[in-house]
Every structure is written in structure tokens, then in C-alpha cells.
Image: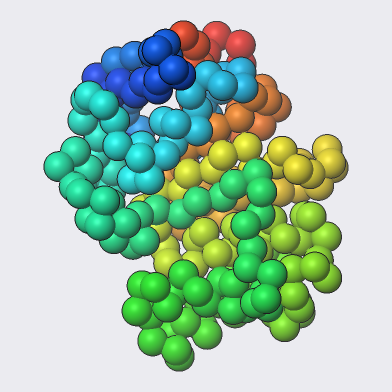
């Protein structure tokens, strides 16, 4: 069996922060391979470096050492502007906080990403309608975020993250602000959308239940990654 090409590859990734005169090592020589179409959970306690690793893979931050490539693009030598363009085209983000623009309605929150990617208005409208229908919000396109429940706001965030057909979806505790029943429905929705559309997903979570929806589970502990034995 021929394995799928790599969607994410990291080698020797290090990231440290300084707190006064103290150096805090968050990532200590991380190696990571994620194949195209794979869903991988990244587990670890709060402060273990999950978000830091996602930010490096997504081009928001740069490592202090090591190399990272995603969607076939080597991020190592890119300046901040290059990482911004890479992120805009190839990466979708879903966060614990929904991060919707309160002055834009549902459709325009999704449209914003398509405009940044220079998608023409006709194709953008088609894409918006298709994604809102997929997340069950076709009838809420004109609603504003403050009119939506938490679960509905996260559905909009998912539609926004996938509307430009990113190669990689990075999800950082995407169910953290939802009750258990809503969280389960959201996980099923993300899983279905990612798999049917052929996206690759790396999801950071502290929850084993969330991780159980993924193909593989990795644990981040003391700056190191290792395969989980808890599934």
C-alpha cells in the first residue's frame, strides 16, 4: 500500500520563551509527519505547547530552530509576509473562541476569507451557500453573531475555515466553549466535512473523547511528542 504524501512535516522544531532571566522551553526538537487526508489529535495539558505548535505549522509563528513544511511549502525561509500569504491560501483555523466579526452577518463572515483570496463574487456566493448548507445554517445567512447560539457560531467558524478549500485544517480546542451534547455534534460535523472533502486536520485538545474521533493521537509532554497509548 502506497502511503499518502505528507501534508505536514516538522523536523527538530524548537521554541522557547523568556520570562525575565528564565528560559522556558516549550517545544524541544519536535518531529512530526501528517499524511494528506489524515486526522491527528494533539493532546497535552494546558501550557504544554499545543497551540504553539499549531501556530508554527500554520505560519503564525516561526520556530527558533528546525524546519516546517505544510501543503508542500517550506515555511522555514519565509518572512512574515510570505507566511501570511501561505496561511491565507492553504490553512483553515478553528479556535475555541469563535472569533466572528460582530458587525458582519453570517454570510459576510464567511465571505471575508474568500475576498482575501480574491475569489470572484459569483463563486464566493456559491461557496458560501454550499458551506452554510453543509453546516446546517443556510437559513441564517443574514443573521448576526449575537443572534446565534454558541454551537451555531462555531458552525459559522467551521464554514469560514473550510470555504477557501484549505489543504490543512488546524483546530485548537474547537469544542472548549460548548456543552457536551453540542460538542459531540460539532465533532461529528467537523469529522464528516474534513473527511468527505479530503482535508488534513491537526486538532489540539486535552480531551481523550475529542481525540477518539481522529486517526492517530499524539501526546505533547515536556516539549516532546510521542504516540498515545490511551486510545
Where residue 34 sits, quadrant-wise, is top left
Q: Is residue 108 above or below residue 63?
A: below
Residue 53 visible somewhere in the drawing: yes
Residue 9 visible somewhere in the drawing: no
Q: As drawn, is 193 to the left or to the right of 113?
A: right
- Scheme of image coloration: rainbow
Marks counted in the figure total 0
In the image shown, does 104 or 90 lie closer to the viewer?
104
Q: Which residue is depicted at the point 52% across and 77% down? A: 111
Q: Is residue 127 above or below residue 211?
A: below
Percent of width and height locating residue 57 = 35, 39
Percent of width and height locating residue 12 = 24, 19
Residue furthest front in the image:
20
Q: Which residue is depicted at the point 18% across and 47% down? A: 78
Percent of width and height locating residue 153 = 72, 60
Q: Is residue 1 above or below residue 59?
A: above
Residue furthest left in the image:
77
In the image shown, does 146 or 22 lie closer to the viewer?
22
Q: As drawn, is 78 to the left or to the right of 57?
A: left
Q: Which residue is depicted at the point 62% across and 57% down? A: 99
| Quadrant in which the N terminus appears | top left
Percent of width and height locating residue 150 = 79, 55
Q: As drawn, is 110 to the left or to the right of 222?
A: right
| Quadrant in which the C terminus appears | top right
Q: Which residue is depicted at the point 46% across and 54% down? A: 92
Amino acid at each position: 500500500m502506497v502511503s499518502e504524501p505528507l501534508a505536514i512535516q516538522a523536523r527538530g522544531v524548537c521554541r522557547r520563551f523568556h520570562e525575565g532571566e528564565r528560559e522556558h522551553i516549550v517545544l524541544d526538537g519536535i518531529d512530526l509527519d501528517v499524511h494528506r487526508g489524515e486526522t491527528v489529535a494533539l493532546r497535552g495539558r494546558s501550557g504544554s505547547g499545543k497551540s504553539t505548535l499549531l501556530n508554527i505549522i500554520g505560519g503564525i509563528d516561526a520556530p527558533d530552530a528546525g524546519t516546517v513544511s505544510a501543503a508542500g511549502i517550506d515555511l522555514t525561509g519565509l518572512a512574515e509576509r510570505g507566511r501570511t500569504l501561505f496561511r491565507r491560501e492553504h490553512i483553515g483555523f478553528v479556535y475555541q473562541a469563535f472569533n466572528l466579526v460582530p458587525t458582519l452577518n453570517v454570510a459576510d463572515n464567511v465571505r471575508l476569507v474568500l475576498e482575501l483570496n480574491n475569489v470572484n463574487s459569483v463563486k464566493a456566493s456559491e461557496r458560501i451557500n454550499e458551506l452554510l448548507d453543509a453546516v446546517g445554517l443556510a437559513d441564517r445567512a443574514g443573521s448576526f453573531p449575537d443572534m446565534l447560539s454558541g454551537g451555531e457560531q462555531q458552525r459559522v467558524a467551521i464554514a469560514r475555515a473550510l470555504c477557501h478549500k484549505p489543504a490543512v485544517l488546524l483546530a485548537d480546542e474547537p469544542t472548549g466553549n460548548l456543552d457536551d451534547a453540542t460538542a459531540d455534534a460539532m465533532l461529528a460535523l467537523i469529522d464528516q466535512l474534513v473527511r468527505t472533502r479530503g482535508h488534513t486536520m491537526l486538532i489540539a485538545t486535552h480531551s481523550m473523547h475529542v481525540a477518539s474521533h481522529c486517526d492517530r493521537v499524539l501526546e505533547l509532554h515536556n516539549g516532546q511528542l510521542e504516540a498515545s497509548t490511551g486510545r
